[in-house]
Amino acid sequence: MLPNIYLRETTTEFIRRINCLSGNENPLWGKMNVGQMLSHCCLPYQQILGENTDRPPFIMRVLMQWFFRNSMTNDQPYRKNLPTGPTFIRTGTHDVSEERQRLISYVEAIERLGPEGLASIPSLSLGKLSAVEWSNMLYKHLDHHLRQFGV
């Protein structure tokens, strides 16, 4: 069972880990640098909060719902080097301090939203998710990328 993203202790631990990033870390896998990774990690929260409404193409949404939904929302950690959806790829320069603060504010916003609030918002890729599915997916994604940089 994964930690519950709606609990303060999970938020506090994520914030601690995010704040451990100096920006000089090299990834243990993948191509992103720290700034790009932090920007990438903000995207699911931006979609949830309506700040980013970019949806994958219809056929991609169908494939994700039929073939990837379970692996994205179950309680098993993501494997290293999984492919990144085109709308989630971040290139260029991203200020680590700015992206760090944005990500922390998003993690805190989801905690405040709570399980009922989050479960009422459909995923742009997967459709309606339960509070547990949302918690698992968001926890796994952020944990995966923090581990990618050794924190």
Image (spheres, helix red, strand yellow):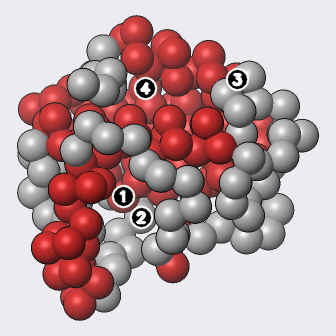
Query: Of the residues under marks 3 and 2, which one precedes in the sequence?
Result: 3
For image coordinates 84% across by 40% down, the residue present is 25
- Mark 3, mark 2: which one is toward the viewer? 3
User: Left or right: where does residue 119 sit relative to residue 4?
Assistant: left
Give 27 or 38, whichever is nearer the viewer.
27
Amino acid tagged 2: Asn
- Disc number at residue 19? 3
Disc 2: which residue: 52
Disc 1: which residue: 47
Residue 13 lies, in percent from the top left, at 51, 15
Measured Cα–Cα span from mark 4 to mark 1? 15 Å
Give the vertical position of 54 relative to 149 (above or below): below
Measured Cα–Cα span from mark 1 to mark 2? 5 Å
Measured Cα–Cα span from mark 3 to mark 4? 14 Å
Please tell me whether mark 4 sits on a helix, a strand or a loop.
Answer: helix
Query: Of the residues under marks 1 and 2, which one precedes in the sequence?
Result: 1
Figure quadrant of the C terminus:
top right
In contact (CB < 8 Å): disc 1 and disc 2: yes
Query: Of the residues under marks 3 and 1, which one precedes in the sequence?
Result: 3
- Disc number at residue 108? 4
